[in-house]
Image (cartoon, grey):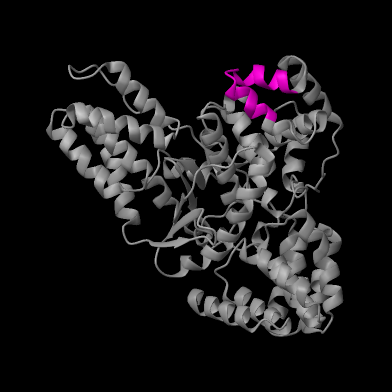
């Protein structure tokens, strides 16, 4: 899951592991327990429930049966009941090390989520659990995208999973670490801030990051993983999983909304030229295990282009056919070869050759901006302007900021234009400052023109969307303003100005009810 590094939007899907090998007991065969455990690992919840019920009738007090019941409850979100069952299993002589490990994870998850508020999406397909308070602002944006994704991704992959599907939002990366197998260091190093695991979608709130991140597309990315998992019973390798999820994370926006962001293209271009790509083997067992946000972003870009190339060769049914072939019992590479009509090694060779000729963005080295996730705890005191390495451009930016703070917007524009001559037209920090001054000078049209290349090159830079929304309001372009500001909310909905301006846009469009809703959101996040 890339966050452009999409923002390295790096996000991950981890196959649910077989947590314990179950030995035989007198009352039932070892094979029965292993089969049920495998049903749980494949998220075949209805079949697992029936099988567990049969085992419980034979010997309900057996620690291994209790373990299966606890694991089922865990996957269903009944954490308190799962802990109680594991306590009983341990008391009845169960495998202390394995059972305690699972118990600790479930107990931690229960402690994190016990006071969460539950929301149900409009069609009842998603149950979204969020902390009380400001994170409740995420719900309408998440529910809208997920309900659309249910239909769109279902059509693309030829499968719509059973519902409702559980979604949990965590306030910080440290919280995600508490409820998963990842360490906080792995999360921050790789930029993996969302997971599809334990039969649910798990995502970090954008308020944990300094500039937010493309959290709505990231959430849909995890939903794509969920569809793949449930369709194939967790039999898809990580590189294929991530390629499909990356390609389809924007599918909720429309059939042709897929795209690889320029910053990711630029990284991939450099790695192709230096012959320093990430191998499929290095991606296993998880993108979260890669050593840096850049490596994760490159890996996501690679697997995106694998799926892009496959679809170009096979057509719109490629992805559904690929998963259907896996369901026929083929391994991943055989399924791929059958889908594309050539040996996988030949496809891989052709894809690598395609990468060398694929058109990719070439961003200037000295643009003064690097797109990556900025975690609040690590970056709270950092100045975006200080990240600009070119001294002369940085000096012009500092002077421009000082003048802007004193409401000398015309003089600030002079300094920003000087910096622009040195940095080019795509530095988002520079050009949002420039747009702000232009808006104060009643030059909204010029502000939009300045921000257009920023929007295309760094679409996760939230302030650009906010300023474009304000410029569109000033020009009376209220529908455009609504779209720009909605996109800002899909990156960082914790800025009250986003909701205040959305309320203004809806009011101008004659929708008093929506205007009232966004004024409430503005108060909620203030």
Say above or below: 78 vs 85: below
Is residue 338 highlighted in magenta?
Answer: yes
Res 468 → quadrant: bottom right
Q: Which residue is more in the foreground, 41 or 348?
A: 41
Question: What is the x, y in percent for residue 19?
Answer: 34, 28
Is residue 383 highlighted in magenta?
Answer: no
Question: What is the x, y in percent for residue 34?
Answer: 34, 21
Q: Main secondary structure of the magenta part?
A: helix
311 relative position to 283: left or right: right
Q: How many marks?
A: 0
Which residue is painted at 31% across and 25% down in the image?
20
Res 97 → quadrant: top left
Question: What is the x, y in percent for residue 113?
Answer: 35, 55
64 relative position to 112: left or right: left
Question: What is the x, y in percent for residue 166?
Answer: 45, 50
Which residue is painted at 32% across and 37% down in the image?
71
Q: Is residue 299 visible?
A: yes
Q: Which residue is more in the foreground, 246 or 293?
A: 246
Which residue is painted at 75% across and 48% down in the image?
255
Which residue is painted at 58% across and 54% down in the image?
146
> In the rendered structure, which segment of residues is drawn in magenta?
321-339
Say above or below: 449 vs 61: below
Say above or below: 25 vs 112: above
Classify the position of the N terminus by image quarter: top right
Res 311 → quadrant: top right
Q: Is residue 471 visible?
A: no
Q: Which residue is more in the foreground, 154 or 191?
A: 154
């Amino acid at each position: 899951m890339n966050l452009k590094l999409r923002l390295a939007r790096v996000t991950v899907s981890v196959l649910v592991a077989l947590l314990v090998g179950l030995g035989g007991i007198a009352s039932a065969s070892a094979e029965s327990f292993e089969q049920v455990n495998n049903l749980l690992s494949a998220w075949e919840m209805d079949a697992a429930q029936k099988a567990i019920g049969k085992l419980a009738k034979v010997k309900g007090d057996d620690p291994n049966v209790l373990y299966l019941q606890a694991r089922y409850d865990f996957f269903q979100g009944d954490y308190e009941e799962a802990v109680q069952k594991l306590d009983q299993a341990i008391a009845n002589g169960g495998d202390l090390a394995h059972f305690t490990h699972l118990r600790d994870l479930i107990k931690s998850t229960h402690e994190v989520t016990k006071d969460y508020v539950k929301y149900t999406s409009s069609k009842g397909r998603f149950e979204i659990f969020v902390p009380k308070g400001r994170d409740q602002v995420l719900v309408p944006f998440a529910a809208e995208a997920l309900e659309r994704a249910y239909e769109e991704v279902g059509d693309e992959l030829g499968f719509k999973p059973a519902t409702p599907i559980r979604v949990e939002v965590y306030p910080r990366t440290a919280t995600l670490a508490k409820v998963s197998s990842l360490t906080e260091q792995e999360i921050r190093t790789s930029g993996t801030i969302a997971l599809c695991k334990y039969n649910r979608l798990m995502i970090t709130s954008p308020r944990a990051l300094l500039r937010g991140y493309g959290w709505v597309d990231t959430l849909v990315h995890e939903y794509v993983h969920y569809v793949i998992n449930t369709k194939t019973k967790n039999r898809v390798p990580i590189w294929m999983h991530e390629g499909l999820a990356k390609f389809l994370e924007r599918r909720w926006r429309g059939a042709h909304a897929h795209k690889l962001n320029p910053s990711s293209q630029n990284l991939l271009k450099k790695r192709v030229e230096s012959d320093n790509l990430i191998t499929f083997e290095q991606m296993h067992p998880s993108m979260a295990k890669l050593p840096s946000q850049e490596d994760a972003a490159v890996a996501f870009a690679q697997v995106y282009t694998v799926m892009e190339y496959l679809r170009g060769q096979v057509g719109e049914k490629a992805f559904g056919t690929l998963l259907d072939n896996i369901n026929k019992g083929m391994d991943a590479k055989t399924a791929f070869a059958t889908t594309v009509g050539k040996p996988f090694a030949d496809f891989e060779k052709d894809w690598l050759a395609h990468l060398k000729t694929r058109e990719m963005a070439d961003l200037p080295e000295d643009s003064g901006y690097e797109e990556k996730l900025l975690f609040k705890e690590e970056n709270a005191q950092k100045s975006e302007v200080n990240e600009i390495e070119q001294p002369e451009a940085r000096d012009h930016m500092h002077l421009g900021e000082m003048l802007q703070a004193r409401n000398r917007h015309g003089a600030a524009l002079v300094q920003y234009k000087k910096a622009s001559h040195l940095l080019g037209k795509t530095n988002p920090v520079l050009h949002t400052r420039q747009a702000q001054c232009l808006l104060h000078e009643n030059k909204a049209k010029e502000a939009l023109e300045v921000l257009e290349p920023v929007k295309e090159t760094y679409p996760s830079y939230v302030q650009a969307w906010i300023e474009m929304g304000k410029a569109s309001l000033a020009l009376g372009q209220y529908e455009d303003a609504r779209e720009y500001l909605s996109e800002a909310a899909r990156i960082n909905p914790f800025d009250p100005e986003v909701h205040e301006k959305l309320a203004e846009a809806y009011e101008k469009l004659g929708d008093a009810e929506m205007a009232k809703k966004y004024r409430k959101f503005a108060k909620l996040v203030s």
